Image (cartoon, helix red, strand yellow):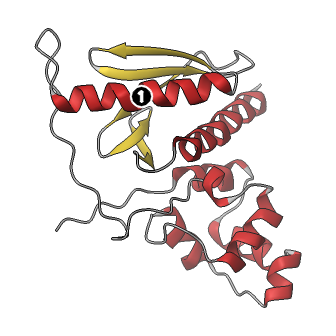
């Protein structure tokens, strides 16, 4: 059995956007009211385990401290409460080539992307679904981001970087992660100006 870890890029991007190193984030987390109340001791290694996908879902004590620090719940920070075998995903079959008959994998991918597009559209994002190859272009609500490309394999990938599990993971969790990533991208654009 192959174990595929999906890095938590949402959390890493949040941390980097805040200008924090892993030790600085751990220190900030330890200073939150929840961490002090629960006597948490977080360190850079723990942050690294979250960001590399070794820990896919924080314990309730860390969830409270993360919320105090970031203002977000775990699902919006890229954490995934996955299937009974943590970190295990079946590899996706290869997609067919443009111009050929769609494979079952293509049809599954198109279905997952269409469902995600509906969830994102309901949140005010612009979406455009391409079926050959299956991909979804997502634009933010402020139209300052012309579009990020979401593709699928064993995981959803944003601009070719895996960031969220596919169903049965609730699509709302994936949409929460996209929402955080899009807001962080906007913040980065404003900081560059």
Disc 1 residue crowd, few under 14, some 14–19, many 20+, Cα 10 Å: many
Query: Residue beneath label 1, please?
Result: 113
Identified at 70% across, 15% down, the residue is 143
11 and 98: which is toward the camera: 98
Q: Position of residue 48 (x, y in %)?
A: 53, 70
Identified at 44% across, 31% down, the residue is 159
Identified at 79% across, 87% down, the residue is 38
Does 32 appear above or below 116? below
Q: In this rendering, would 88 be left or right of 118?
A: left
Q: Which quadrant holds the C terminus?
A: top right
Q: What secondary structure is found at the residue carrying circle 1?
A: helix
Identified at 58% across, 30% down, the residue is 119
Q: Position of residue 147 (x, y in %)?
A: 55, 19
Using the rendered view, name the quadrant where residue 52 is placed: bottom left
Does 104 appear above or below 33? above
User: For the view shown, which residue lies furthest in the left direction?
Assistant: 100
State whether residue 29 appears in this view. yes
């Amino acid at each position: 059995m192959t174990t595929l870890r999906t890095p938590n890029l949402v959390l890493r991007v949040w941390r980097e956007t805040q200008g924090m190193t892993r030790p600085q984030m751990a220190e900030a987390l330890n200073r939150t009211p929840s961490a002090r109340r629960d006597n948490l001791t977080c360190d850079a290694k723990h942050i690294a385990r979250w960001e590399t996908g070794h820990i896919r879902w924080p314990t309730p004590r860390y969830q409270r401290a993360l919320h105090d620090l970031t203002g977000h719940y775990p699902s919006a920070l890229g954490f995934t409460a996955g299937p009974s075998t943590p970190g295990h995903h079946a590899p996706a079959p290869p997609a067919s080539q443009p111009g050929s008959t769609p494979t079952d994998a293509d049809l599954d991918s198109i279905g997952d992307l269409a469902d995600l597009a509906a969830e994102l559209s309901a949140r005010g994002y612009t979406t455009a679904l391409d079926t050959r190859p299956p991909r979804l272009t997502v634009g933010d609500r402020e139209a300052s981001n012309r579009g990020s490309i979401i593709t699928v394999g064993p995981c959803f990938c944003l601009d070719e970087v895996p960031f969220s599990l596919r169903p049965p993971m609730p699509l709302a969790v994936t949409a929460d992660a996209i929402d955080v990533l899009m807001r962080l991208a906007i913040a980065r654009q404003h900081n560059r100006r």
